[in-house]
Image (tube, rainbow, N blue to C red):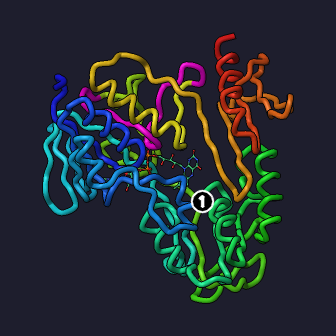
Amino acid sequence: MSAVGRVTVVGNGVAGWSCAARLGERGVDVTMVGPGLPHDRPPLSKRALVSGRVPLLADADRLTEKGVRHVDGRVVDCDFATHRLVIDDGSEIEADQIVWATGLAYPRPPVAGIALAAENTTGATMLDLTARTAVEGRDVVVIGAGLIGSETAATLAGRHRVTLVDMLDRPLARLHPTASAAAARTLADLGVTFLAEARIEEITASSVRTSTHGTLPCDVAVSAAGFRTSLPTALAPDGRSLTVDVDERLRVVGTTDVFACGDCIAFPHPRHGRLQIPHWDHALYSGRHAADSLLGDDTPYVREPYYFSDIGPLRIQQVGLATAAAEWRVEDGLTIGRDDVGRIVAVLFLNAPARLREARELVAAGANP
Ligand SMILES: Cc1cc2nc3c(=O)[nH]c(=O)nc-3n(C[C@H](O)[C@H](O)[C@H](O)COP(=O)(O)OP(=O)(O)OC[C@H]3O[C@@H](n4cnc5c(N)ncnc54)[C@H](O)[C@@H]3O)c2cc1C
């Protein structure tokens, strides 16, 4: 048994689960709070939307095996001075240490009729979308052509007529033009109609009315636009910050016994300064790292940004920080970004999963020339 006290992990996604499981394995008294069984997110817009199966990270047996107590609910109030957490059923938990891992929240855009739209960000919303698209050949309108919207559109295009709309001029418009162009081509090949610079006025039971592209027939609208914070006021006093600042051991700045991990943190990256990485790989590794820090390990958390995306048959992967690149060049099939003194800061590659290690090594070499 370790010297750590009773730990409560708030959040049951990949960060919360990887933290709780590691603590449980080491004999720590650990409680994980979150709605439903812990499940993963990336498969929701890919194979889970086809199979209709929620990608569980653990079932009841696995929770027991790992020694993790699960409270099925949401934390609605917290006092970090006294370490008390209030759950939505009115019960309270008192912890010695707390780990915050609530990810991001996915708001709907302020559009008339948006309540009629489905979503695809949790197991429950994926199941609802699967039920609404059970009958083949529906007119589906996906609102938002970021990663989740583009992946969802590509997956649904196998059985439905899919229109993808965005306020911006191309799918994945915030990513590198190589990724964006490849996504646009793949979506078109899959039969997805992309409508650029669209302004939606109203969603009804049978249509999406726009001021830019007329009225679109629509049996199922899917909202896939944007993020907002999941943090309580105690961690995001302005109510807007997506992330809470943590130190290099993932302890929340200004606290002694509160740690955080996953999508909801900004950590001090040795090369890029304070960084948030809203992607799966960082969630997994920061969850494990928060557990190790609690167990007394002083190693700083260092992880290069990495994301993958599957838009139908197209696999996009990127290691490093694209916004740190001053120029990009294609070299031997990799799109390589360098900073203003020529060091590699990011590597983007398409349909080449076997090159991940090489990409990581290039970015690591750029960090330690
Ligand atoms: C549909 C989808 C597809 C994705 N695909 C990819 C991909 O292909 N590649 C990639 O790199 N990344 C992908 N991502 C992003 C990746 O899944 C996230 O970075 C990762 O899930 C973050 O993990 P997390 O544990 O920090 O947060 P989450 O996975 O969001 O988990 C947070 C959990 O906390 C719970 N929670 C929130 N508030 C409370 C509260 N007050 N009390 C208790 N529990 C609470 C939530 O219900 C949720 O279960 C995808 C995300 C989505 C939604």
At mark 1, the secondary structure is loop
The residue at label 1 has a CB less than 8 Å from ligand 1? yes
Question: In the figure, is residue 243 to the left or right of 86?
Answer: right
Eyeballing the image, is 68 above or below 199? above
| Residue 271 within the segment the image draws in magenta | yes
Q: Which residue is rendered at x = 62% and y = 64% of the image? A: 152
- Viewer-nearest residue: 43 or 169: 43
Residue drawn at x 68%, y 16% as measured from the top left:
365
Residue 260 located within the stretch drawn in magenta: yes
Name the image quarter holding the C terminus: top right
Q: What span is colored magenta in the figure?
A: 255-272
Q: Is residue 132 left or right of residue 184?
A: left
- Where residue 259 sits in the image (x, y, percent)? 32, 33
Residue 42: x %, y % from top left: 54, 52
3 vs 218: above or below: above
**Dot 1 crowding, Cα within 10 Å, few <14, some 14–19, many 20+:** many
Q: Quadrant of residue 277?
A: top right
Q: Quadrant of the N terminus?
A: top left
Residue farthest to the bottom? 206
Which residue is at the front of the view, 183 or 166?
183
* Residue 29 higher or lower than 151, as above or below: above
Q: Which residue is mark 1?
A: 46
Q: Position of residue 303 (x, y in %)?
A: 53, 27
